[in-house]
Amino acid sequence: MVSKPHGGKLVSRVLDKSERILEEAKELPSLEISKDTAIDLENIAHGVFSPLEGFLVRNDYLSVLDQMRLESDIPWTIPIVLDVNKSELKEKELKEGDTILLSCASKNIALMEIEEIYDFDKKQHAEKVFRTLDKDHPGVSRVFDMKDSLLGGKIDFIRGVENPFENYTLYPIETRILFKEKGWKSVVGFQTRNAPHLAHEYVQNTALTFVDGLFINPVIGKKKKGDFKDEVILKSYEELIRNFYLKDRAVLAILRTEMRYAGPREAVFHAIIRKNFGCTHFIVGRDHAGVGNYYKPYDAQEIFEEFPDLGITPIFFKRFYYCKRCSGYVNERVCPHRGKDIILPSGTKIREFLMKKQFPPKEMMRPEIARIILNFENPFVE
Amino acid sequence: MDDRKHTTVSIPVQLYEKIKKRIEGTGFTSVSDYVTYVLREVLASLEEEEKEEVFSKEEEEKVKERLRALGYLD
């Protein structure tokens, strides 16, 4: 049996007969939201963010900041909020209790009942979620760019924003049925924002030794400069699965959401999402969802000690590397060698080779994968 | 300041003392923290044992059709 959805029930806030509803709702006041918020909304509607049924109301928001739990005591670490300017609220005469249309790129995408309008403290938000106020941190900088008020309340989804990766998009109901059809009773989720190098592969294979299936679930969405472009990640994983994985034991589908770079908190958030997809286990590597030196290498593993009730089992890995003396891929827990004996498949070094249009050493990345990446004129986010 | 909403439950004094001793030198800073942790763990495992969610036949067929069209199922 795959994992139960977080909070016990898979949320669905997708409206049937959406065209008729749109027609009826066209007189409602509307509010334009960003593409990232629209994608959050889509994730709420399809149960990716179960048990959320809408954007956080004040008590849930404060509880997430302070306790990393919703007010109902269910673990939740990243605030999913809708920000709006007071001036816009005033201009549109929006108030609590109103039902509004949410639109993105001038397309109506959802209905929302405004349960609460509340102020928030950006400094507190940034410090709690990211453990820093340094505006060089991409997550902190985004918080300080947010509008000045938050709207909380349930949403009803009508239709989504443009999705260039529709064929790679599966929602929790689909992955749950897929895992069931494949006969997987245990599934390990793998989060990534990178093209695969050999250490990723070894982590995945090690985990797969103990479970029935591997769910490779790259994050597709806003990333920082220098990260791999979405299509590069997908094409390189397709190549890896096609040639090096057992067909019936690995599934690739995307997670559309922005990277927050919130390190430990985001690792728990990522685990919850994979639980909703039906995973029973989740791989947490070194510096998961980290950026720069804001988090210690294993902070994102230690935070799980605070959640005995998460409902998904985290699998922690130390750093994997190639050891010349062991003649293979190993990790710090099994190999006594260090220094010149080992080749670390560092993402930074691999990027340097690829940027120079060179193949990284085969001990870092398979040439078949490097070739796919090098076929792209510019494989990195600019 | 810890602004969590709390309420009080009673446990036998002997049990309280036993827990107090057990958490010495661990990451738990109070008996209350330990009891909260254990209860969350127990409740979560009980919830896991509850009945599996089932989808309607119609819903399942619709999903399978899409999965086949995308190549996820043969």
Image (cartoon, helix red, strand yellow):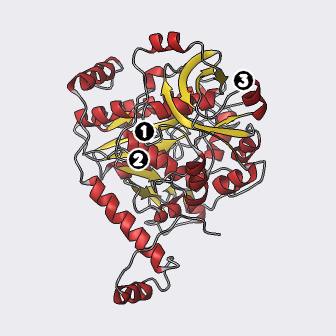
Q: Is residue A323 above or below residue A160?
A: below
What chain letter is assigned to the residue under label 3? A
Element type where label 2 sits in the image: helix
Q: Is residue B14 above or below residue A349?
A: below
Sort mark 1 into few (<14), some (14-19) or many (20+) by Cα contacts within 10 Å.
many
Task: Let me know if marks 3 and 1 both belong to one chain.
Answer: yes
Task: Let me know if marks 3 and 2 both belong to one chain.
Answer: yes
The tag earlier along the polypeptide, 3 or 2, is 3
Depth-wise, is mark 3 or mark 2 nearer the camera? 3
Q: Which residue is mark 1?
A: A216
- Mark 2 vs 1: CB contact within 8 A: yes
What chain letter is assigned to the residue under label 1? A
What chain letter is assigned to the residue under label 2? A
The residue at 41%/50% (across/down) is A282
Relative placement, left or right, of A227 versus B12 is: right
Q: Amino acid at mark 1?
A: Ile
Q: Which residue is mark 3?
A: A92
Depth-wise, is mark 2 or mark 1 nearer the camera? 1
The residue at 71%/39% (across/down) is A149
Q: Is residue A368 visible?
A: no
Element type where label 3 sits in the image: loop
Q: Which mark is residue A204?
A: 2
Q: Return the x and y of residue B52 as percentages of the image width and height.
A: 24, 44
